[in-house]
Amino acid sequence: MNNYYSWQSYIQQMMQQMEQQRLLIEQLQKKIEEMQSNDKPTTVIERIEYHFDQLKIETLEGTLQIGLTPNGADVSELGELYANQGGPPQDSVLHSLQEYMTTDIPMWMDKYVRDHDIAISDDHKQHMITDVRKQLPQRIEFYKNQDPEIDETNLLHQIQTEIRQSMAQYFDSYQGDG
């Protein structure tokens, strides 16, 4: 009877294992069916953080040409490419004003505050320059709307004069740092 009992126990164990495997197979089949029923794979993008504290861009201008020239044109010089773009004439005025704000205005500001004995930090002056730079396209548009026939030289001169007068007026009313 021992043999019979051991065989019976062995078969019972095998039946239990087969039942467990059958249940596992059913679960896996359900998961496969669920995955197949989702036609659209979903991608979850969690929060992306950018840290630009090391990056400082004052002004970004111009056109970047990568690869072929527009319309497959054969351009022998890079200057031809930009000359043929036909951008609005205010681009050259804006570029000249940007240069003016970079080279001439800081020296003019230093001289003005020194001559008028005004205490102002370099950071404050830089902030003023940045603020004026942001307003340049609107000022160009303003003067162009006032006089559509104005030439670039007069436009440039008017805006440069306005910049100096506005800054002088601000400096004269400014109480000073500290």
Image (spheres, rainbow, N blue to C red):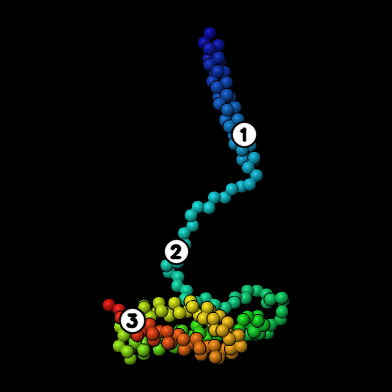
Locate residue 133 relative to residue 170 in the image: left or right: right
Q: Quadrant of residue 126?
A: bottom left
- Which residue matches tag 2? 51
- Which residue matches tag 3? 174
Q: Quadrant of the C terminus?
A: bottom left
Q: Residue at position x 68%, y 84% from top?
A: 76
Q: Position of residue 57 (x, y in %)?
A: 47, 74
- Looking at marks 2 and 3 on the same chain, the residue that comes earlier in the sequence is marked by 2
User: Toward the viewer: 176 or 25?
Assistant: 176
Q: Residue at position x 43%, y 80% from top?
A: 129
- Looking at marks 2 and 1 on the same chain, the residue that comes earlier in the sequence is marked by 1
Classify 165 as above or below 127.
below
Q: Secondary structure at mark 1?
A: helix
Q: Residue furthest left?
A: 178
Locate residue 132 relative to residue 114 in the image: left or right: right
Classify 8 as above or below 60.
above
- Looking at marks 3 and 1 on the same chain, the residue that comes earlier in the sequence is marked by 1
Nearer the observer: mark 2 or 1; the answer is 2
Q: Position of residue 71 (x, y in %)?
A: 71, 75
Q: Secondary structure at mark 2?
A: loop
Q: Residue at position x 61%, y 40% from top?
A: 35
* Numbered circle sitting on residue 29: 1
Q: Quadrant of residue 121?
A: bottom left
| CA gap, disc 2 and disc 1 | 45 Å
Q: Amino acid at mark 1?
A: Gln
| CA gap, disc 3 and disc 1 | 78 Å
Nearer the observer: mark 2 or 3; the answer is 3
* Numbered circle sitting on residue 172: none
